[in-house]
Image (tube, helix red, strand yellow):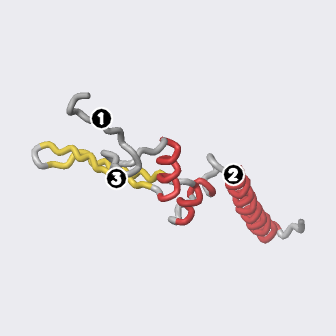
Amino acid sequence: MTGLEHRYPGPETEAYGPPSGSLADLLERVLDKGIVIAGDIKIDLLDIELLTIRLRLFIASVDTAKKAGIDWWETDPALSSRAARDALAEENARLRERLDALERAAEETTGAVR
């Protein structure tokens, strides 16, 4: 046998690098805690600001977003059928009030009864 020993990493040896995990574990952690990515793009010409774009990206689960106070998808009629129904109900109520006001005004001017 030569003077070289072959050692294989066992439980008593330390692994090199960060502990490995699956992509699912990483995604679960990000969605559970949330992550914010922010950046600004600014275009200047001769010290004159032409364009500024601010980007903010928040990646999280729905529950984490609600805990952070973000729930715009619940009130956006394009994303929520409940919000669309609520928007239609509000519009209907406004139109009924407007119609009643117009009918009252017409009755006052003509003296007609409904």
Most extreme residue toward the front, as rendered?
1
Residue 97 horizontal side relative to residue 68, left or right: right
Secondary element at image label 1? loop
Residue 91 horizontal side relative to residue 22, left or right: right
Q: Earlier in the sequence, mark 3 or mark 1?
A: 1
Q: Which residue is mark 3?
A: 38
* Residue 96 coordinates in the image, percent (x, y): 77, 61
* Circles 2 and 3: CB atoms closer than 8 Å: no
Q: Residue at x 59, y 53 (%)?
A: 73
Q: Amino acid at mark 3?
A: Ala
Q: Which residue is mark 2?
A: 84
Most extreme residue toward the right, as rendered?
114
* Residue 29 coordinates in the image, percent (x, y): 49, 53
Q: Residue at x 10, y 44 (%)?
A: 46
Please identify the quadrant where the N terminus is shown.
top left
Q: Which residue is mark 1?
A: 6
Q: Is residue 22 positioned above or below 66 on the image?
A: above
User: What is the distance, in whole Å, between disc 3 and disc 1 at their CAs?
Assistant: 49 Å
Most extreme residue toward the top, as rendered?
1
* Residue 71 coordinates in the image, percent (x, y): 57, 59
Query: Which mark is nearer the camera, 1 or 2?
Result: 1
Secondary element at image label 2? helix
Question: Which label number is shown at residue 54?
Answer: none
Tell me which corner region of the image, top left, top right, bottom left or bottom right, holds residue 114: bottom right
Q: Amino acid at mark 1?
A: His
* Residue 51 coordinates in the image, percent (x, y): 26, 45
Q: Amino acid at mark 2?
A: Ala
Tell me which corner region of the image, top left, top right, bottom left or bottom right, holds residue 97: bottom right
User: What is the distance, in whole Å, between disc 2 and disc 3 at their CAs?
Assistant: 31 Å
Frontmost residue, 26 versus 53: 26
